[in-house]
Amino acid sequence: MRHVIALDVGGTGMKAALVDENGALLHQARRPTGRERGPDAVVEGILGFAAELRAYGAGRFGEPAAAAGVAVPGIVDEEQGVAAYSANLGWRDVPLRDLLAKRLGTPVALGHDVRTGGLGEGRIGAGKGADRFLFVPLGTGIAGAIGIDGRVEAGAHGFAGEIGHIVVRPGGIPCPCGQHGCLERFASASAVSLAWAEACGETGADAADCAKAVEFGDARAQAVWQEAVDALADGLVTALTLLDPRTLIIGGGLAEAGETLFRPLREAVRRRVTFQKLPTIVPAALGDTAGCLGAGLLAWDLLAAAAPAPAPSSSSPSTTDRR
């Protein structure tokens, strides 16, 4: 069975799969990233994991994977196949595409983790059929993937979609990026966790606890939650003004609150739009498999781009025969 290797590398764990041409997950596996052992060990762990998947696929399906796709965090030069920088993994300028291609003996596509997850959601998940979409996962931080006609826009320098660093509260909380008042300092899952822990006085409280308290009518939780929703709506309307997506897909840990998030968020966005067209606002559909499925799509796209063009039909008239 023809298949590809898909790897989604995170700050703490790696998710992997073998994916067929229809996007089905034929085999899945996970393991720690091992960042505590340093960047060189992380890279070797990725290479070894991919080699194990290749061997498994060859034994299980009678042939090795035709290609591989890998999604990594941080700054990614997709064109050159270089993992340029990741604060979480500690690497700089790792030629990961070439290293994997040499280890596997197959072509490899390298992508940014959020853009790759967005590719999966946009093409086969919640955005399926939408010609323009914006995928925004709300996790430790906030990023975005801009979908255009089945592909995801990386930008001229690989920074497209960094919606988490739109300033929504000028002069507000300092952000590691160097600005003050960035969206992710108010509306990410980690920001809500910090705000709720402070409000309720429990150091271990997190965003999921806040959502539950909102559902039970806790006034403190409702205040924390509404502040996050308002900040998120401000950032999203800025993005809508610039990008005009047909579908807005919200994922990540905060989206697991379901309608506790989506009901007030839809209303907050609706109140803020004026001339803009209100997009359909939907939860992500693929969960934590989005990155793997997107990496698989990257690999299949790579194979499709390399395939030779079909030969002209023998029944077509030659140039000299045309009158």
Image (cartoon, rainbow, N blue to C red):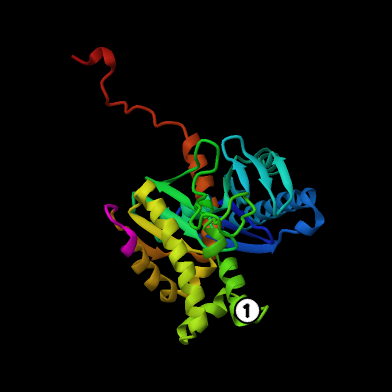
Q: Nearer the viewer, residue 259 or 149?
A: 259
Q: Is residue 212 above or below residue 144?
A: below
Q: Is residue 1 something one can see in this rendering?
A: no
Q: Position of residue 246 (x, y in %)?
A: 32, 54
Label 1 Cα crowd, 10 Å radius (few <14 / some 14-19 / many 20+): some
Provide the residue span drawn in magenta.
270-276
The C terminus lies in which quarter of the figure? top left
| Left or right placement of residue 212 versus residue 206 in this view | left
Q: Is residue 306 something one can see in this rendering?
A: yes
Residue, far front: 171
Q: Nearer the viewer, residue 225 or 117?
A: 225
**Residue in the image at 47% along x and 40% along y:** 304
Q: Does the magenta segment cover residue 280?
A: no
| Left or right placement of residue 39 versus residue 20 in this view | right
Q: Nearer the viewer, residue 232 or 178?
A: 178
Q: Does the magenta segment cover residue 273?
A: yes
Q: Position of residue 247 (x, y in %)?
A: 35, 57
**Residue in the image at 50% along x and 49% along y:** 297
Q: Position of residue 114 (x, y in %)?
A: 54, 53
At label 1, which amino acid type do we have?
Ala
Q: Is residue 282 above or below residue 180?
A: below
Q: Position of residue 194 (x, y in %)?
A: 62, 71
Where does label 1 land, which residue?
205
Q: Within the image, what quadrant is residue 8 found in?
A: bottom right
Q: Secondary structure at mark 1?
A: loop
Q: Nearer the viewer, residue 298 or 127?
A: 127
**Residue in the image at 72% along x and 58% along y:** 33
Residue, far left: 323
